[in-house]
Image (cartoon, rainbow, N blue to C red):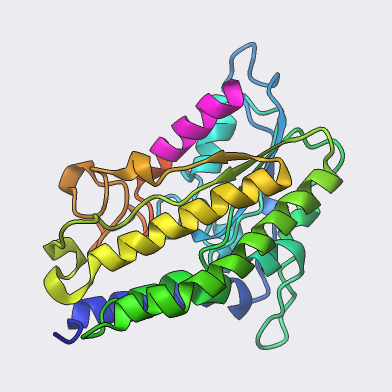
Amino acid sequence: MPPTRPLLAALALIAVTAACSSSDGSADRSSADTTTGSGSDTAATGPRYVALGDSYTAGPQLNPTDKASDTCLRSTKNYPHLLAEAIGAASFTDASCSGATTDNVLESVATVGGGKAVPAQIDAVDKDTQLVTVGIGGNDSSLFSSLSVACTRPGTACEDYLDDKVPGILRNTGKNIATVLEAVKERAPQARVVLVGYLGVTPADRGCDALGGDALDTAGVSAGERSIDRTMAAAARTAGATYVSMNAASKGHDACAGDEAWTNGLSPALGDGAVLHPRAAGMAAVASAVEKVVAS
């Protein structure tokens, strides 16, 4: 069965989001540098916190959006903001950017049209940083978007992509993630470094209207999600960082879960996140999971 038009439109939107961090150079981190505080006596006793990552960290189309983040599309209700408030961070910088790859964490992003380049995310980390969360890897080699496209094609296209392409992509991605984590640790030797996994979008055993019915091989996409989860866990071990997996926790909260969903399907509610991206409930779940790890 060929992909439905809504699913094709959704995949096109993913491709646009993945290009956001390099399509305009006006986005930077300056507006994200904040000192948090809830008004309590312990508001400023938490760590100096920096968040790095891609759209699953930034929260595109999740209101309210920090307008100064421009094409990075950072929400002020993404999990880094929620976490910073929960832990009473003494200072907080959200350097995440929709569409980012591991390269974009370590290097300034080349821009189209001669605009100012987006700085390397890691520039926000220094020797005084005490906590760094990193959510990255899904855009390397266009993994997520390519997997979604392959798993809308007929026959064995999804299985072939998983068998023939994904293992090599993930080997490189794992190395890239470990390199990012090691670079963070070098810049901030005293910091707690936490790699944050991706929420699961698809159930392993069924499709649903929210994901285009039978047009998407949800079992294949789910297998890909589990594969990158394992890759991220291994990269964290290699780099001596902490890993917070959200894959298993997402069971029963995928895009087919209705009101219990942590991620969107093809028709998100206005202001509650982008297509196939975290909803407010998902961001809150990630913040809570990371907070428990940080507190321990």
Relative depth, front residue between 177 and 66:
177
- Residue occupying the point 55% across, 74% down: 168
Relative depth, front residue between 161 and 251:
161
Q: Picture coordinates of residue 243 (x, y %)?
A: 57, 41
Magenta stretch? 285-296
Q: Quadrant of the N terminus?
A: bottom left
Q: Is residue 176 visible?
A: yes
Q: Quadrant of residue 127?
A: top right
Relative depth, front residue between 45 and 196:
196
- Residue occupying the point 55% across, 28% down: 293
Q: Quadrant of residue 70?
A: bottom right
- Residue occupying the point 71% across, 73% down: 109
Image vertical order of residue 272 relative to residue 37, above or below: below
Q: Is residue 242 left or right of residue 115?
A: left
Q: Picture coordinates of residue 101 (x, y %)?
A: 61, 67
Q: Picture coordinates of residue 288 (x, y %)?
A: 45, 31
Q: Picture coordinates of residue 133 (x, y %)?
A: 63, 43
Q: Is residue 18 visible?
A: no
